Image (cartoon, rainbow, N blue to C red):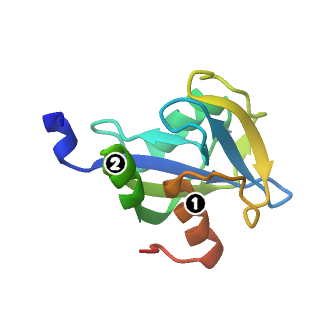
Amino acid sequence: MNPSDTKPRVGIGVIIKDAKGNILIGKRNSMHAPYYSIPGGKLDLGETFEETAIREIKEETSLTIKNPKVIAVTNNLKTFQREGLHFVSIILYTKDFTGTPTVLEPNKCSEWLWCDPHKLPKPHFEASEKAVACYLEKVVYIG
């Protein structure tokens, strides 16, 4: 195990809701293949959660989001058990965006879909599934 892997890392996930009530979900094809997931990425040193959310969404989808708000935290222990990397994810939410989702990082994601949050595509990435559950149940954390 790499010494940098001995401490949890911070991930940022973003729930983006469209006017129809659907949320943006990507089909992952890299390290997290074959899972579907909300968009997001890693918190960079010195960034706020909001800055990371705005940057990652622009980099991954070409969308410009505004006013993302922290709504939940997930502790991704199933992923840790499976992959050996422990991430704590900060989940943000926004319905304020412009643009059309475009695959900008085809090495990480093969497509973007607008999905009913009650009917997530499977298999679904743990952090994303927990994030959407928190969003739907209006709670900050689900153990």
> Measuring 55% from the left and 71% from the top, which residue is drawn there?
134
Q: In the figure, is residue 124 to the left or right of 92?
A: right
Instruction: State the residue in front, 95 or 78.
Output: 78
Instruction: State the residue in front, 38 or 56.
Output: 38
What residue does disc 1 label? 129
Query: Farthest residue toward the left?
Result: 3
- Looking at the image, do the residues carrying marks 2 and 1 touch, with CB atoms under 8 Å apart? no
> Measuring 45% from the left and 48% from the top, which residue is drawn there?
12
Q: In this view, does 48 lie above or below 116?
A: above
Q: How crowded is mark 1: few (under 14 residues within 10 Å), some or many (20 or more)?
A: many
- The mark that comes first in sequence, 2 or 1, is 2
Q: Which mark is residue 10?
A: 2
Q: Horizontal and vertical percent for residue 55?
A: 51, 34
| Count of marks placed on residues | 2
Q: In the figure, is residue 140 to the left or right of 99?
A: left
- Assign the C terminus to one quadrant of the image: bottom left
Q: Which mark is residue 95?
A: none
Query: Farthest residue toward the front?
Result: 82
> Measuring 53% from the left and 64% from the top, which residue is drawn there?
130
Q: Horizontal and vertical percent for residue 73?
A: 42, 64
- Assign the N terminus to one quadrant of the image: top left
Q: In this view, does 77 lie above or below 11?
A: below
Give the foreground label among 2 and 1.
Answer: 1
Three-letter code, disc 2: Val
Three-letter code, disc 1: Glu
Q: Horizontal and vertical percent for residue 39?
A: 59, 43
Q: Quarter-wise, where is residue 78 in the image?
A: bottom left
